[in-house]
Image (tube, helix red, strand yellow):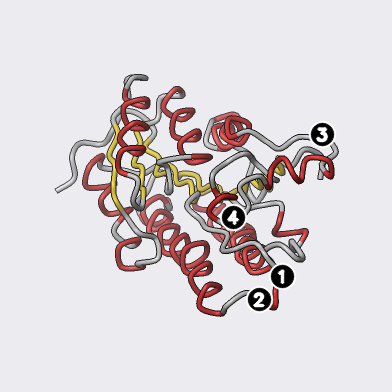
Amino acid sequence: MARPTSHHPVTIVTGASRGIGAAIAVRLAAAGHDLVLTYRERAAEAEAVRVDCEAAGVQVLVLQVDMADLDAAATVVPAAIARFGTVTGLVNNAGITARIGPFLDAPIEETEMVFRINVLAPTLITQGAIAHMATDRGGAGGAVVNISSGAATSGSPNTYVTYAMSKAALNALTIGASKEFGPVGVRVNTVSPGTTRTEIHAAAGRPDAPDERAPGIPMRRPGEVHEIAGAVAYLLSEDASYTSGADIRITGGN
């Protein structure tokens, strides 16, 4: 049975134990959001994010969820509702790039995993969140923010074409869902970071990628995680009450 509805916004942030997700969680906590944070395996980092967020005076539920397990992903929204009684926001942040390299070297098994985590899990979680938020289903409205990538429009040749493909799919989710559910009180938007200084590059085999790419970025530097978090906080705020179907590109001019 759900607890009484929170007096704060209640926002789910997937992949919140580090990098962009952790920065988003801390920023939203400062803005007064109660939070449901998911992580895959870094329990100590997730706990540190929880402590940082609770220091802002909000409540935090931390869930260990492997987004490659779609059955597990489908439990996120019900767990949030069970804890807080409602969900008002969702940030689909969790994602992987796969290894950096030429398209012809990308194993199909790896591509399947990229799509499972970057597309199918967010699709399931978004369906659950919108079904709860939509006013024609008894909800009070809400907002979804999809964390995409500048790669979705550049295609990232010689780098990670399949990752770019997955993020393009996420952009299509934003466009379609924003139009379908705008009439029932749900806003859906995208934030598309460019090269940002996070650990995701090391996981893809190129830890120095942000600085290597800096000369080709008009601002001559990679982005920082707090610069992404600010855009997400805006899209979940009342200041963005008439913003839906948008893609905020934080790419240093690319």
Between marks 4 and 1, how big is the CA–CA gap? 34 Å
Picture coordinates of residue 47, whole percent (x, y): 30, 35
The amino acid type, in three-letter code, at marker 2 is Asp
Name the one closer to the observer, 185 or 31: 31
Between marks 1 and 3, how big is the CA–CA gap? 26 Å
Give the mark, 2 or 4, whose residue is nearer the N terminus: 2
* Residue for badge 3: 219
* Residue for badge 4: 178
The residue mark sitting in front, 2 or 4, is: 2
Between marks 2 and 4, how big is the CA–CA gap? 35 Å
Give the mark, 4 or 3, whose residue is nearer the N terminus: 4
Q: Relative to residue 79, is residue 29 drawn left or right?
A: right
Between marks 1 and 2, how big is the CA–CA gap? 5 Å
Q: Decide: few, some or many residues near mark 2? Use Cα within 10 Å; few <14, some 14-19, many ≥20.
A: few
Q: Which residue is drawn at 57% across and 59% down?
A: 97
Which SS class for mark 3? loop
The amino acid type, in three-letter code, at marker 1 is Pro
* Residue for badge 2: 105
Which SS class for mark 4? helix
Between marks 2 and 3, how big is the CA–CA gap? 31 Å
Image vertical order of residue 159 relative to residue 58, above or below: below
Q: Do the residues labelled 1 and 2 touch (CB within 8 Å)?
A: yes
Q: Relative to residue 22, is residue 199 drawn left or right?
A: right
Picture coordinates of residue 13, whole percent (x, y): 42, 44
